[in-house]
Image (cartoon, rainbow, N blue to C red):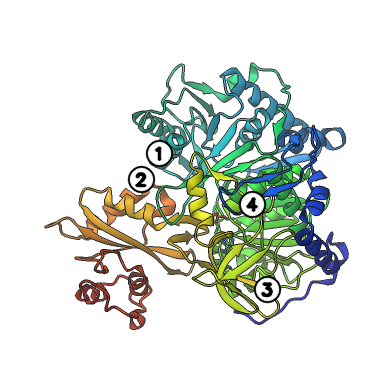
Amino acid sequence: MSSKVYPVSKSAKTRALIDSDKYQKWYEESIETPDKFWGKHGKRIDWFKPYTKVKNTSFKGRIPIKWFEDGLTNVSYNCIDRHLKTHGERVAIIWEGDNPYIDKKITYNELYDHVCRLANVLKKHGVKKGDRVTIYMPMIPEAAYAMLACARIGAIHSVVFGGFSPEALAGRIVDCESTFVITCDEGVRGGKPVPLKENTDIAIDIAAKNYVIVHNVLVVRRTGGKIGWAPGRDHWYHQEMASVKPDCPPVKMKAEDPLFILYTSGSTGKPKGVMHTTGGYLVYASMTHEYVFDYHDGEIYWCTADVGWVTGHSYIVYGPLANCATTLMFEGIPTFPDQGRFWEVIDKHKVNIFYTAPTAIRSLMGAGDEFVKRSERTSLRLLGSVGEPINPEAWEWYYHTVGEARCQIVDTWWQTETGGIMITPLPGATDLKPGSATRPFFGIKPELVDAEGKTLEGATDGNLCITDSWPGQARSVYGDHDRYIQTYFATYKGKYFTGDGCRRDEDGYYWITGRVDDVLNVSGHRLGTAEVESALVSHHLVSEAAVVGYPHDIKGQGIYCYVTLMADVEGTDQLRKELVAHVRTEIGPIATPDKIQFAAGLPKTRSGKIMRRILRKIAEDDFGALGDTSTLADPAVVDELIENRQNKK
Ligand code: WTA
């Protein structure tokens, strides 16, 4: 833990929407009288019918959570229509292509046209309120149009990250029984094509074997590359868009009608379809976007996430657009054409607020300062970080080299399930400590508990829980509310358990230490060890697998796999390569194993439970501290595992 403190700068304080007094006052009000507080702030979005009830929530029993329940609104209306009278010609989306010479700007008027037309295309093909639409897209504006078009007609979107494999896509299509897919011929990243339509075709075949038939595929033409075509099922986006009306009335949605499903990994089983609803989500996403980034009218805001993740949902699309911001969408990668790309884009589009992930910061820091120094970055005013703990070295580099000690840093902690930022500095209110996400946002009640669930007070380490509802909270797991209750509310009764470990210091600052469950965080992406294990054992030569994380300089965590092969199969380097490729096809490149260790046996208790604690230690090359191994069924396996470890320092 770094002991340095960076006080709020004078300039940040002067311009800030929230100073420390206001933070204190609002925070107290939000905790003591949540109905009054959120009753007021719920009005930041437009309602067709105003709500009269504000908060109706419980973390007990079936976990019923309702915010603004009798209000009627529409997310797409709030992100577009309501801005048109005064700001129709303002740029809503700046799109920066993978190729540094290609970009375009989309005004709010144009956004209205695209989204209405696309909503009409969906309607024409029979998509109705409550239907699930899968969006498997690269970072092009059409991905945002697709999300907003669904929201406009009340269809529930499920965006699947374009880096996921056909198998992973199929699993998500099947789980929510989605029969309409929006995709693109090919994506482009770092100059290379990504075969999205081809992946979609494969996924649709797999889904059909699982009795979910995709009836329609809408295909955006991005590269013009060669693709397969199923007449009747596949439709060109540009052709369909040309043949429909440019207006489409927004459907009046109940506040608690679902807005989207987003699949995310947990410690067990398949990824869960985390479900967010309409009113509370938008209030929370837009409010956090405004105050955390201290967003002022007319500023250019850039979040480098992918729309396939929750950060893209809340802080590329919904939060910024609800606030009538100009949001930059980047198709490419930070290292193409070279490691100076981010800084070049900042100069090119005069970006004021820049929000990225520690893994990108670490990797660009490693590239050397000359890439940063090549740019001016004078437009920059605020820097943000999200996705994993940021180590103090990376924080300091971000602060001093990228921000030239001029820009506050907001290290924002949150999750897919929380819908928006939960623990974070506010630029004009919070003194910064490198590596700490600092303090809770309005309405958020964090609590640290020990393994038994006892509440811990003062400066301490513990498991991070949230003890009362906030409007952006996920309401369910799609189609499996029991799993929602089990995953988040069963570990510590009456509390939402985040799965994260955390330290609170003497000043009441929170320091997230990382997952305490079997979830990996690889380059800021969540991945269940169980998912990687099940991918490995689906290979015909593998009998058993156990996967753990280990500290990785760039990725935060690397993926370490222990694999027991079928009898008489030899563990060769060739087989290692084959297994790596196999996991990539099953899940996608983000799950690429870093180390594979062939093991004759895994350390198990007498009841057959794998002792991951030991596997983690060996993967970290820290086997001097293995702890108690006396409960092992066969202690000799440990020696063999140590002997053959793949991560010798
Ligand atoms: C981790 C991403 C430390 C954490 C928005 C959490 C962080 C998981 C931070 C959620 C941060 C996210 N500091 N850890 N600022 N932000 N995390 O669902 O472990 O993809 O539980 O949401 O990322 O990942 P998810």
Q: What element carries label 2?
A: helix
Q: Count of labels shown? A: 4
Q: Mark 2 points at which residue?
A: 585
First along the sequence among labels 3 and 1 = 1
* Residue type for callout 1: Pro
* Residue type for callout 4: Ser
Q: Position of 446 compared to 551: left or right?
A: right
Of residues 503 and 539, the one drawn nearer to the viewer in this rendering: 503
How far is the residue under mark 3 from the one under mark 4? 27 Å
How far is the residue under mark 3 from the one under mark 1? 42 Å
Q: Mark 4 points at which residue?
A: 58
How far is the residue under mark 2 from the one under mark 3? 42 Å
Give the residue at x 63% y 71%. Answer: 395
* Residue type for callout 2: Thr
* Residue 480 placement (x, y as % from top left): 48, 42
Give the residue at x 41% y 33%. Answer: 198
Q: Position of 627 compared to 236: left or right?
A: left
First along the sequence among labels 4 and 1 = 4
How far is the residue under mark 4 from the one under mark 1? 38 Å
Q: Name the residue under label 1.
A: 166
Quadrant occupied by the N terminus: bottom right
* Residue 628 placement (x, y as % from top left): 32, 80
How far is the residue under mark 4 from the one under mark 2? 41 Å
Proximity of marks 2 and 1: CB atoms separated by less than 8 Å: yes
First along the sequence among labels 2 and 3 = 3
Within 10 Å of disc 3 (Cα), the crowding (few <14, some 14-19, many 20+) is many
Disc number for residue 199: none
Q: Position of 301 compared to 495: left or right?
A: right
